[in-house]
Amino acid sequence: MILTKAQYDEIAQCLVSVPPTRQSLRKLKQRFPSQSQATLLSIFSQEYQKHIKRTHAKHHTSEAIESYYQRYLNGVGENGAAPVLLELANEVDYAPSLMARIILERFLQEHEEAPPSKSVINSMLRDPSQIPDGVLANQVYQCIVNDCCYGPLVDCIKHAIGHEHEVLLRDLLLEKNLSFLDEDQLRARGYDKTPDFILQVPVAVEGHIIHWIESKASFGDECSHHAYLHDQFWSYWNSSEKESLILWLKSQSLVKFVIVGI
Amino acid sequence: MAAVLESLLREELSVAVAVRWIARSAQSSEDDPREAAALSSLRPLRKEFVPFLLNFLREQSSRVLPQGPPTPAKAPGSSTGLPGRSGGPPRGGRGARNQLFPPIEASSATAADAPSARRGGRRRGPGPARERGRGPGGLEEGVSGECLPWAGGRRPRSSGSPSSPSLARSDPPNLSNLEEFPPVGSVPPGSAGTKPSRRINPTPVSEERSLSKPKTCFTSPPISCVPSSQPSVLDTSPWGHGIPSGCRSLQEEREMLRKERSKQLQQSPTPACPTLEPGSPHPSRTGHLTAEPADPTRVSSRHRLELVALVYSSCIADSLESPLFQSVHDCVFFAVQVLEHQFHVLSHLDKGTLKLLAENERLLCFSPALQGRLRAAYEGSVAKVSLAMPPSAQAVSFQPETDNRANFSSDRAFHTFKKQRDVFYEVLREWEDRHEEPGWDFEKGLGSRIRAMMGQLSAACSHSHFVRLFQKQLLQMCQSPGGAGGTVLGEAPDVLNMLGADKLGRLRRLQERLVAPQSSGGPCPPPTFPGCQGFFRDFILSASSFQFNQHLMDSLSLKIRELNSLALPQPEPSDEDGESDVDWQGERRQFAVVLLSLRLLAKFLGFVAFLPYRGPEPPPTRELQDSILSLRSQVPPVLDVRALLQQGLRARRAVLTVPWLVEFLSLADHIVPMLDYYRSIFTLLLHLHRSLVLSKESEGEMCFLNKLLLLAVLGWLFQIPTVPEDLFFLEEGQLDVFEVDTVASEHGLDSMPVVDQQLLYTCCPYIGELRKLLASWVSGSSGRSGGLVRKITPTTTTGLGAQPPQTTQGLQAQLAQAFFHNQPPSLRRTVEFVAERIGSNCVKHIKATLVAELVRQAESLLQEQLVTQGQEGGDPAQLLEILCSQLCPHGAQALTQGREFCQKKSPGAVRALLPEETPAAVLSSAENIAVSLATEKACAWLSANITALIRREVKAAVSRTLRAQGPEPAARGERRGCSRACEHHAPLPSHLISEIKDVLSLAVGPRDPEEGVAPEYLEQLLGQLGQMLRCRQFLCPPAEQHLAKCSVELASLLVADQIPILGPPAQHQLERGQARRLLLMLLSLWKDDFQVPVPLQLLLRPRNVALLADTRPREWDLLLFLLRELVEKGLMRRMEIEACLGSLHETQWPGDFSEELATLFNLFLAEPHVPEHQLRACELVQPNRGTVLAQS
């Protein structure tokens, strides 16, 4: 299924200043019943990431962190069971998982002697039961499971989608009897940045000669449109390939696209 | 005329106005009205001005410039015995040295203005060069059956002036030689009605001389026109040119006039030596040369000289042509002035010329500034040009490809052709051997043999075969891509190799100095067929076969079209870094090859095409001419050169098209330029010539040297006698008709720097005249000034005879070369290709086998090392060193294996690629050569790189192994994949993670009151999870890990009854049976389907247990059920659970919760086995579970 730019823009229009929660996604689904949840989520994620990239810095000033932390403390002081952190994130228009990270970092700074390392924090976010404070652990967990655009679970979903589509693509190539080199083989040959597959014998698809295929179906950027990826891919392919083409691939109810080298 | 000059000199007219006046018929608004008025009255004279100016200059200067002294350095004594004027103009022999004196003046006439406009020539005109200078051996000398028909030695003109013909070609331009520098202003051929000169009767010329001396001269005195009233003398040469015979007498007349004048001007009573050169009437001339250098302080009327120089230079600059000379000082001053104005052009000349100019004493003396600029230009110049003629005769090569029987209609035709080929090469060899012998005559020696051979060519196809051979041979022998550096002195390469590069260069320079022709026939030589070209021309003439000529024209036309449309590479013109400069060398060379080939082919096409029409002179009467014209205009052109020219201009490829077109047209007969078709071409060329202004250089315009080349060849063409001068005056109004849209393509060849100095000098050898003149001036003056000529000490190879015998290897290589020489070129290409590929494959093969094996060894060695030394294994760098020292020696095997590989693979490849029919001996030689070449290539690479390669690969392997030492995922790869029958229809992992995450978020909240999940949905979800875990097609470990964790979270929520269930508000909780079913599903997934460790201990983490604390009433039975099932299914050990439960005590709990927790703990401990009834009991006591638990 091909999503037009206009459709994409219409959806994106509804996503301005909407928190990345289950509820938002549900509303979106009601608004665009013809689109699959995966597509909507993917657009949501895409747009929300753009938004976060723009606003990220203002949430990381020391004043902001301090004020968030105080508000969190006050909130849980009143009622530890209330979704304090999640509501705080929604209120200041920031991703709950990222807000959880800010507060967790701040909390650990206060309670540990050494400043917490990134890996410790990541590990705690992945498994909040490691967080020494029970209330905070619950708050963090709540943020993570309610965030549909950020957090370890979302990352895992993205990764899983990427992997699935690579597998899908490989199956298709095998099915079509196309000889290819995959990323591992390419890496072994000394390529540093590689597409997913290089066809050993080019094929023609709808008049385009295709040399390579990159599955770009990861959760976050599958809805990026042509020009964006085109630019991104120049860094990979600056010599022989003159053009890249994005093909949408529909298979097993997945809407995804691949970038193919021409 | 004189009035105009007069006005100029009196500064009543500005130079700019005068030049505009010359250039345009219309007045310009910029002109001062007063000046314009002064000029407008002179309008009818406009056309006369340029010739007048030139003649004025020439006559003025010739009075003071010496004509005849021999080289002082060479024959100082002879200078005293110079003849008087009686001997006529100087010619031949010593004349070469006579011109030492006026090099600067002459230089302004040769190189400086050669590209744009030269002296002499037609009446006048705003456009092209008008020079009519005739070099020694002018066009009209014709062939006369000699081997050097064009540049042939000049015959003595009169008995009183003997000359040595062998040196005739080295004549530098001689100003007072009327043949070389005839006065300007002559009669257009065919114009009638003017009266013969009234002053001196023409002297009849002997028939003998009629063959060898220039005949077309424009010798009428300035302004007055002299008709060609003399009966023509037919040129009897096989393809004689038309000779306007009337000029001959005028020439004589002119000389006599000059003699008269010199008598008046020079009061030199020195006794003449009649046996020596004429032309130097004044002994003080010699004095000038040796003792009286030109002195800038002695310049008279400096300002007026400056003005004239400016006019002259402006004429040059605007593609126009140029008294005052009272002494040599004036001449030198004038010349230096002109050179200064033309510095831009000078700076583009070759390094050698610039050096000579910069070192010229007179130039230094008169204009140190110019000298400085020249020196700077010399130092910055990289344009080294060799004036040496490329080696003319190359080895005759056989072309086995053309000998193919399949190309012939019959055996007979094939055999005939073979015989003909043999005859052709025999003739060619004989010519090579003998053509330089005195007295040898082509026609006499070879004519009959050639005609006999042509007689055998009966079938049309035989003709085309022979023509192909002829053309191929022509291209091979005569094409001389400049700068390629032919063999030095024809020596064998190995002898030269012994000399080393430096000495080789010296030898080349010496050779150049010794054998380079001293003169290529003056600044404006006629078209010639130098070197081998002479053979082909004479062959055509001797063969005199209509069929042959026709086939030759067809073939030449085809080849010209093909080469002319050849897409020459056009790299970006923008980048100027060194790298692209290197690339450009190749492009330039290719362009040069194509251009020179085209010029050669076009010249021969012109020669053959116009051969039948070539007559001695234009028809004498208008009626005859008209009838010829009407006849000829019916004949279609042999090649549509006009279309090609227009195409070339449009595609901005003039730099390729025009030079060959000029060659073609240079051999046209007298009628050709009058034909409408060709007239339009000339007009187009004229227009092009005028549009090329050297001083203007703008973006996207033609490159300077390209422009210079075009100007030089066009200027040369326009002065060829067959091109009528009136052509250049009639068309003025019509030029716009031929406007060519050159904007069409922005980046044609014209704007690429495709022409370099070497190509320029190769195409226009007359530009090199300046250098030769300067060089001979230097060598002439060296005796006096201590020698500016650097000695080139030739190196002798020591003990050439006692040379050690060549190594077998060298001999083998030579044998291989010899072998290839006798075989078709495709064989060589095949062998070289095979060797190249096999060599490369060999290296790859060694990498994949030997090196890979060594890497495997390295890995196992490393494993051993790690086992013996423990996990750490020591410093990686040290490990690498140890491994490499063990393994690298094995690299030596690479050479052996490589040799084997090449030995094994090459012969098959050669055999597969060569024709089946290749003789066994040839095949086996080819195979052997391929093997040795491939081995050489492979072993060279391997011996240089194998150690480094092994090292690199081992290093990569070591770091890989060390990385792999880290904690390995426990359940990797054991049971990967699903059954073959699986069609992978299970839901995707990403989808399931997403769904489970939604359930978790719903359970954790916050949620809307109406939110919840259906129990069936949960069952379905877990069912899908099971499916997916069993399919595994799309599953990756991280996803599985997250799913495992999520499933544990889900279990905790189930146990705590925290999952909101859809349904009536009262029934918001999951039924216990449903909950237990879901838990059992999870237990089964954990036990059977997950392949990653499931973090079950999370179930008993405080955070998860705390979920129970929130429920009212608390329900412990599901947890107890789960724990017991875990133990039952072996998913957790009792000890583990006990430890977890124990650690829960460390957490702060609400009082009652602690109690209940303690009870659960005890209960779990107390009931090692999990009987069914216990669970049921739990259920039964549900209302007050705490109590029940406590009781049990």
Image (spheres, rainbow, N blue to C red):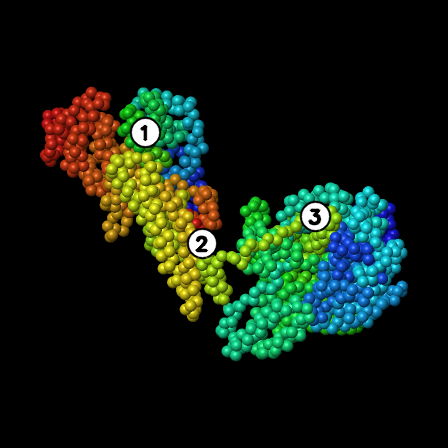
Quadrant in the rendering for residue B921? bottom left
Q: Is residue B746 above or below residue B160?
A: above
Q: Nearer the viewer, residue B792 or B319?
A: B792
Circle 3 chain: B
Kind of residue indicated by mark 1: Val
| Crowd rating for badge 2 (residues with CA inside 10 Å; few <14, some 14–19, many 20+) | some
Residue B452 at what x, y percent from top left?
A: 61, 78
Quadrant in the rendering for residue B625? bottom right
State the residue position of label 3.
Answer: B788
Viewer-nearest of discs 1 and 2: 1
Residue shown at the point (49%, 64%) measured from the top left? B818
Residue B649 at what x, y percent from top left?
A: 65, 57
Going by the image, does B467 lie left or right of A154?
A: right
Q: Quadrant of the N terminus of chain B?
A: bottom right
Residue B815 at what x, y percent from top left?
A: 47, 62
Viewer-nearest of discs 2 and 3: 3
Q: Nearer the viewer, residue B1187 or A74?
A: A74
- Distance CA(mark 2)–CA(mark 3): 69 Å
Residue A208, label in figure: 2
Question: SS for tag 1?
Answer: helix
State the residue position of label 1.
Answer: A120
